[in-house]
Image (cartoon, rainbow, N blue to C red):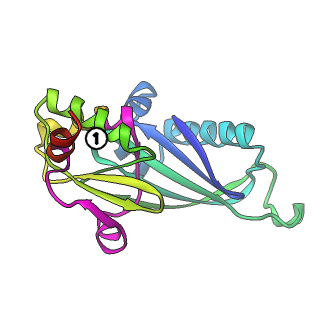
Amino acid sequence: MRLERLTANKIKIFLTSDDLFERGLSKEDIWKDSSKWNQLFHDMLEEASEEFDVDIQGSVAVEIFSLQAQGMILIITVDEVKDDEDLLYDGYIEMQVRVEGCEDLLYEFGEFEHLVGLAKRLAIIDIYGGSLYWFNNRYYLVMDNMEAAHKEKAACILSEFGSPSILSPYVLAEYGKPVMKHFAVETILHFFK
């Protein structure tokens, strides 16, 4: 589980499929009113509260992005609480959940050198292709049209070098600067042996 503070009242939590499996959960358990899922959610809120010194009470909005084989990202937005009268009772958390998914693997990278290392590792297991974009001072690699057998392996290797992104490939195509529209892994390998 990785935590990242996005704004004063917004926190991003990345849960890998392994994190869920270790707790006996699956992505489908989100839709069920399971005590395991509720316990995991409260544990995540408590850890985020301690790490970022945020008082999480009252109403929170939760956006959940399912990322195929690699897990899920939760964006938690804490509503500003004006005073104690706004709380129904102490410790009460009201959730609004929205779930979205993406078929493509989309990862972001801060340094181009990470992409060079990634391309070499992907080539070892014969995974090629992808599109590379530059957007908001970061590189984004979109691995689309992958066979299901390769997708999980690719997600594991991509996670070693970059971070899963919640951006849509359509946003990147519209607003990002294409660096390598096709065959990104092959092109990086060709120029950076």
Secondary structure type for disc 1: helix
- Callout 1 crowding tier (Cα within 10 Å): few <14, some 14–19, many ≥20: some
Which quadrant is home to the C terminus? top left
Q: Nearer the viewer, residue 79 or 166?
A: 166
Vertical relation: 120 (above or below) 141: above
Residue at the outermost bottom position: 174
In percent of the image, x 32 and y 41: which residue is there? 115
Q: Tag count in the figure?
A: 1
Span highlighted in magenta in the image: 158-185
Vertical relation: 67 (above or below) 9: above
Q: Is 170 contained in the magenta span?
A: yes
Coordinates of residue 116 in the picture (x, y in percent): 29, 37
> In which quarter of the view is residue 7 placed?
bottom right
Horizontal arrangement in the rendering, residue 119 relative to residue 79 (left or right) = left
Coordinates of residue 103 in the picture (x, y in percent): 24, 55
> In which quarter of the view is residue 149 placed?
top left
Is there any visible trace of residue 135 in the rendered image? yes
> In which quarter of the view is residue 177 placed?
bottom left
Q: Nearer the viewer, residue 125 or 105?
A: 125
Q: Nearer the viewer, residue 153 or 173?
A: 173
Residue position marked by numbered label 1 in the rendering? 69
